[in-house]
Image (cartoon, helix red, strand yellow):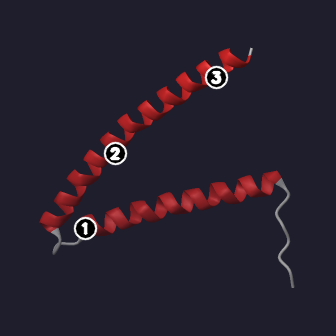
Amino acid sequence: GQRQKLTNGRLILEKSVVIGFLCVRLVLEFIKLVFNLPVTGIYSLMFQKVIISLVKVLLIFAFFIIGFGLAFNIGLVSQVS
């Protein structure tokens, strides 16, 4: 048969939240697995340093994206009025 389309907004939101939590849990379990393996001692340390640096860069990048977005929004809204 044909698949029904999801039209209930609340159901879509609930499923999205559950999937988001499961993805975060999966990433955390993977990190816990990598850091607890005795064979990967130096590799887990390198992975940790790279992830910390990546998160710092992405946070700074997110602030720039939000700032540019707000600047363009202010500029375009003032042109329309």
Q: What residue is at 74 percent from the left and 14 percent from the top?
A: 81
- The amino acid type, in three-letter code, at marker 3 is Leu
Secondary structure state at the residue bearing disc 2: helix
Give the mark, 1 or 3, whose residue is nearer the N terminus.
Answer: 1
- Within 10 Å of disc 1 (Cα), the crowding (few <14, some 14-19, many 20+) is few
Query: Alpha-carbon distance for marks 1 and 3?
Result: 51 Å
- Mark 3 and mark 2 in contact (Cβ < 8 Å)? no
In terms of image quadrants, where is residue 6?
Answer: bottom right
> Where does label 3 land, which residue?
76
- Identify the residue at the far left of this view: 42
**Of labels 2 and 1, the one closer to you:** 2
Task: Pick the quarter of the image with the N terminus.
Answer: bottom right
Q: What residue is at 81 percent from the left and 52 percent from the top?
A: 9
> Where does label 1 land, which residue?
36
**Of labels 1 and 3, the one closer to you:** 3
Q: Position of residue 3 (x, y in %)?
A: 83, 76
Give the mark, 2 or 3, whose residue is nearer the N terminus.
Answer: 2
Number of numbered tags placed on the structure image: 3
